[in-house]
Amino acid sequence: MNKLKRIWGHLRTSFWFVPSVIIALNIILASTLIQIDYTGGNHWLARWPRLFGVGAEGARSMLSMIAGSMMTVVGVTFSMTLMILVLASSQYTSRIVRNFMNDRVTQVVLGIFAGIFTYCLLVLRTIRSGDEGGFVPSLAVSFGVVLALGGISVLIFFIHHIASSIEASSIIASVARDTITAVHRLFPERLGRGPGDDAKDQIQLFLSKQKWQAVTAVRDGYIQSVDNELLLRLAREHETIVRMERGIGDFVVHNTTLASMSMENPPEEDMIAALREAYHIDRHRTVEQDPAFGIRQIVDMALRALSPSTNDTTTGIMCVDYLTGILTRLAGRNIPSPYRYEEGHLRVIAIGPTFAGLAAEAFDQIRVSAVGNLAIMLRILSGIETIAGMTHNAEHLRVLREQIQEIAELAQRSIQSPHDKTRFENRLERVRELLERASALTGAFKPEVQRVSSK
């Protein structure tokens, strides 16, 4: 089942599958209308001879013109799409190219134009003049005109869609939406607790006494997804513990350890094959089970915007805003414990994202690139303030305090203007007060944090 899902995922995000389906539907439509015409089902069209009374030569000319026009439009559409891919890759980051390739609107538009061309060809070949038997499928020819008019509307819509899709705000919002969807799918809504420190120490002591057998990867690539249910079932059936050595988003090399199994003797080939089947490895990362990759794409756009050659602070601010939105959703959710139990038995030791890791992924590199940029620093502080207001988790608050300390130290080194330092310190004071109040509720308040000097 998991393999079928992967195949379906590849098909629906490819450039050719949706157009092929639309072309097949147009073939069925053309065949159906031609059959209706052949059986005399279009006799009611004779009531409007000026509209539907075209002859064989007229029908051929009209359908030939529509078919030729649609092929021209298909070429223009492909050219526009490729131009957008090149532009987005060079201006933002190459990692967003797949977002454009996965755009369902582009796939449908290409399918519509190619489908109209195919429809006209099929109808055209059935037209016969008087000396050839005299058959003109009036209903099918008339519907070809309707499709042509619809194609014009689709072309106008596609031009509007392409123009709006290359805006920085549209690209960032699209990536953030996919990432937030992954967060909602991967993490439960209510907060929970993992093992306490004492329990973790006991688990580590227990695991240190186990004998581990390595299972290696059979190809190079990024881990796109892991079938956790398959890992759990495999561990249950063989009464063992499966420990992931590489997590989703990690790059694995052929013949390096992918996972380990707790057992005295090396696992059998069927066990190794089943464990490898749980991992989907490909040449690129995807966001479906890897929200860190969505964050990575937005960070890459922010770094490009803040580079000296671009110096686009506004785009950088938008990136920080959407990263704040992602982390805000994550702050109020439970990050599952890596220790997965079934009926009181430890079965799987997983590697997954952490709030600290995702926060570092979101803000660390942007902060380094924001040297002397007061607007970005203030925006990061504002984002941390928003995130802190959505969580009472002590660990999350500790991570946010560390982020504040890092941005405060950067401001201390890089902001030269006394006025700008005062503005930053006023905002920093407000954010720290919010964190102190939130931390006090969890008993995690740590007051020993240095202030930024405005001198």
Image (spheres, rainbow, N blue to C red):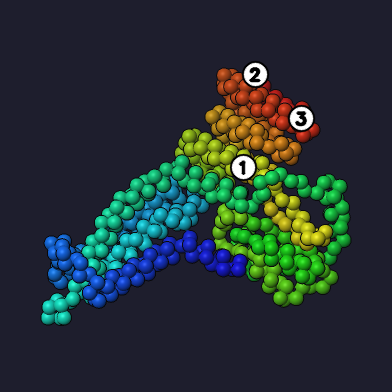
**Most distant residue in the bottom direction:** 132
Answer yes or no: is residue 11 visible: yes
Measured along the vertical axis of the image, is residue 80 above or below residue 168?
below
Q: Earlier in the sequence, mark 3 or mark 2?
A: 3
Residue identified by numbered label 1: 329
Q: Is residue 392 above or below residue 249?
A: above
* Amino acid at pointer 3: Ala
Q: Secondary structure at mark 1?
A: helix
Residues at marks 3 and 1 touching, judged by CB atoms closer than 8 Å: no
Q: Which mark is residue 455?
A: 2
Which mark is drawn over residue 87?
Answer: none
Mark 2 or mark 1, which is nearer to you? 1
Q: Earlier in the sequence, mark 2 or mark 1?
A: 1
Using the image, determine if residue 386 lies above or below residue 161.
above
Q: Locate residue 388 relative to residue 173 in the image: left or right.
A: right
Q: Residue at x 51, y 37 (%)?
A: 318
| Quadrant of the image containing the N terminus | bottom right
Residue at x 87%, y 52% (from the top left corner): 202
Q: Residues within 10 Å of mark 1 (few under 14, many from 20)?
A: some
Which x, y percent locates residue 181?
57, 49
